Image (tube, rainbow, N blue to C red):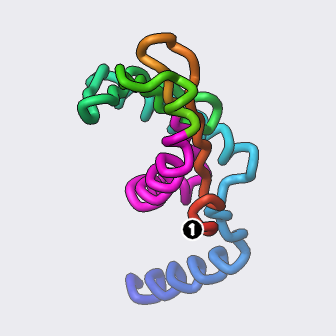
């Protein structure tokens, strides 16, 4: 009696399994965007707990915030010997190249999940924005 019941159960499972639609593992685009916004917000909240953080003798990370699916890292630069205009003129291209290269290596998971990163550098003295580097997955392909 048990053997026929077991055989019936196995056959039934196979028949019903064939009729069941496969579950789609990918989220719809809108759900993915919503999820990425939530991930960016949680990451910003968690990383902000250790701020401010001195990066080097002239740079300090002062804030991290989420702007939709973009993580914004806000830094202050304190170079007494240079004006804001000198910093913008002399340091922009080098910083952009170095930050893009380092971000593509260190933040690969965020970028692959379509979470962009924005690096904002402000003057310690004047609080004005000196640079803004927006990096997404496409930025890494251009290296």
Which residue appears at 31% of the width and 29% of the height? 58
The residue closer to the viewer here, 10 or 91, is 91
Which of the 4 image quadrants contains residue 105? Answer: bottom left
Residue drawn at the location 43% of the way across and 34% of the way down: 43
Question: How many marks are shown on the rendered structure?
Answer: 1
Q: Is the magenta region chiefly helix, strand or loop? A: helix
2 left or right, relative to 30: left
Magenta stretch: includes residue 114: yes
What residue is drawn where x is 66% and y is 38%?
34
Residue 111 x, y percent position in the rendering: 54, 54
Q: In which image quadrant can residue 49 be found?
A: top left
Looking at the image, residue 60 lies above or below residue 101: above
Q: Is residue 110 magenta?
A: yes
Q: Is residue 40 above or below residue 128?
A: below
The x and y percentages for residue 124 are 42, 16
Q: In the orientation shown, which residue stands out farthest toward the top?
A: 126
Residue at which label 1 appears? 143
Percent position of residue 69, x then y: 62, 38
Q: Which residues are magenta?
A: 90-119
Which SS class for mark 1?
A: loop
Classify 10 Å Cα crowding around label 1: few (below 14), some (14-19), many (20 and above).
few
């Amino acid at each position: 009696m048990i053997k026929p019941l077991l055989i019936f159960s196995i056959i039934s499972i196979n028949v019903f399994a064939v009729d069941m639609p496969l579950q789609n593992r990918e989220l719809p685009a809108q759900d993915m965007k919503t999820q990425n916004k939530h991930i960016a917000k949680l990451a910003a909240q968690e990383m902000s707990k250790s701020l401010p953080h001195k990066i080097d003798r002239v740079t300090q990370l002062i804030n991290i915030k989420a702007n939709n699916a973009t993580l914004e890292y806000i830094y202050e630069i304190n170079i007494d010997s240079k004006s804001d205009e000198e910093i913008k003129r002399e340091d922009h291209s080098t910083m952009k190249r170095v930050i893009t290269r380092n971000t593509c290596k260190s933040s690969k998971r965020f970028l692959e999940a379509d979470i962009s990163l924005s690096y904002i550098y402000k003057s310690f003295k004047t609080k004005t924005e000196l640079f803004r580097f927006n990096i997404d997955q496409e930025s890494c392909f251009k290296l």
